[in-house]
Image (cartoon, rainbow, N blue to C red):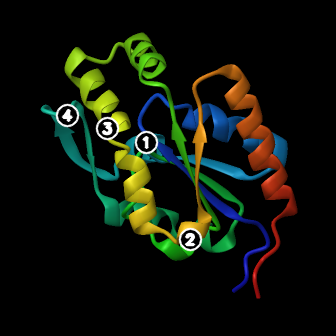
């Protein structure tokens, strides 16, 4: 089955602007935004709480099962900080957002993250963990790294993704 609309994965360290970007692109294009973190909570697609990492332990198989039909239809913006467990065939574009470390630290403080959690996420950003995960998991030509440190970056990213989505054509 050929999809009529593209599927896009927007990934990056927490605090890089994934949800904001997806909400704005969805509003501009009509693509459906799926925030995986919200889906996990709403559908109970997890195995409980991890005290050490202060987060839910998602059940990756259940998440993929919950998304399968929607992804086959197409027209989905998937928003999640991890990316290596989604099937490669789902995505036409993988966007990794990166943010300046100082900006990221401030954003995570505003979310009331613990110092430990802020340090872990900033360290992940410094080490380009999500970029590496994306490039290891998807074809190089579909992975794009975008800067997301300022309102101007966000505006440019929204415009770029909106234009891309509008010009996308299914491959035969």
- Asked where in the image residue 127 lies, by quadrant, the reply is top left
Kindly report the distance in space between the C-alpha atoms of the residues bearing marks 3 and 4: 13 Å
Query: How far across and how far down the image is residue 150, in percent?
Result: 63, 21
Residue 99 in the image: above or below residue 31: above
Question: Badge 2 local density, few (<14 within 10 Å), some, or many (20+)?
Answer: some
In front of the other: 19 or 46: 19
Q: Residue at x 72, y 65 (%)?
A: 6
Residue 120 in the image: above or below residue 97: above
Q: Which residue is mark 4?
A: 53
Do residues under tags 1 and 4 come within 8 Å of each other at their CB atoms?
A: no
Number of labelled discs? 4
Kindly report the distance in space between the C-alpha atoms of the residues bearing marks 1 and 4: 15 Å
Tag in front: 2 or 1: 2
Question: Which of disc 1 and disc 2 is earlier in sequence?
Answer: 1
Query: How far across and how far down the image is residue 147, in percent?
Result: 59, 36
Q: Which residue is mark 1?
A: 37
Rendered image: mark on residue 90? 2
Rendered image: mark on residue 124? 3
Kindly report the distance in space between the C-alpha atoms of the residues bearing marks 2 and 1: 18 Å
Do residues under tags 2 and 1 come within 8 Å of each other at their CB atoms?
A: no
Query: How far across and how far down the image is residue 66, in percent?
Result: 46, 63
Residue 116 in the image: above or below residue 74: above
Kindly report the distance in space between the C-alpha atoms of the residues bearing marks 1 and 3: 19 Å
Q: Residue at x 41, y 37 (%)?
A: 13
Tag in front: 1 or 4: 4
Question: Badge 4 local density, few (<14 within 10 Å), some, or many (20+)?
Answer: few
């Amino acid at each position: 089955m050929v999809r009529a609309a593209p599927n896009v994965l927007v990934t990056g360290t927490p605090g890089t602007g994934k949800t904001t970007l997806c909400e704005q692109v969805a509003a501009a294009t009509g693509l459906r935004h799926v925030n995986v973190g919200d889906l996990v909570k709403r559908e109970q697609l997890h195995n409980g709480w991890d005290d050490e990492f202060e987060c839910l332990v998602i059940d990756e198989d259940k998440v993929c099962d919950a998304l399968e039909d929607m992804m086959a239809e197409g027209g989905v913006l998937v928003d999640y900080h991890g990316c290596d467990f989604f099937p490669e065939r789902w995505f036409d574009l993988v966007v990794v957002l990166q943010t300046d470390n100082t900006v990221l630290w401030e954003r995570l403080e505003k979310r009331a993250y613990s110092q430990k959690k802020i340090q872990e996420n900033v360290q992940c950003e410094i080490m380009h963990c999500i970029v590496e995960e994306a490039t290891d998991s998807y074809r190089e030509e579909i992975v794009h790294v975008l800067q997301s440190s300022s309102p101007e970056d966000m505006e440019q990213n929204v415009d770029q993704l909106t234009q891309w989505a509008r010009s996308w054509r299914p491959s035969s």
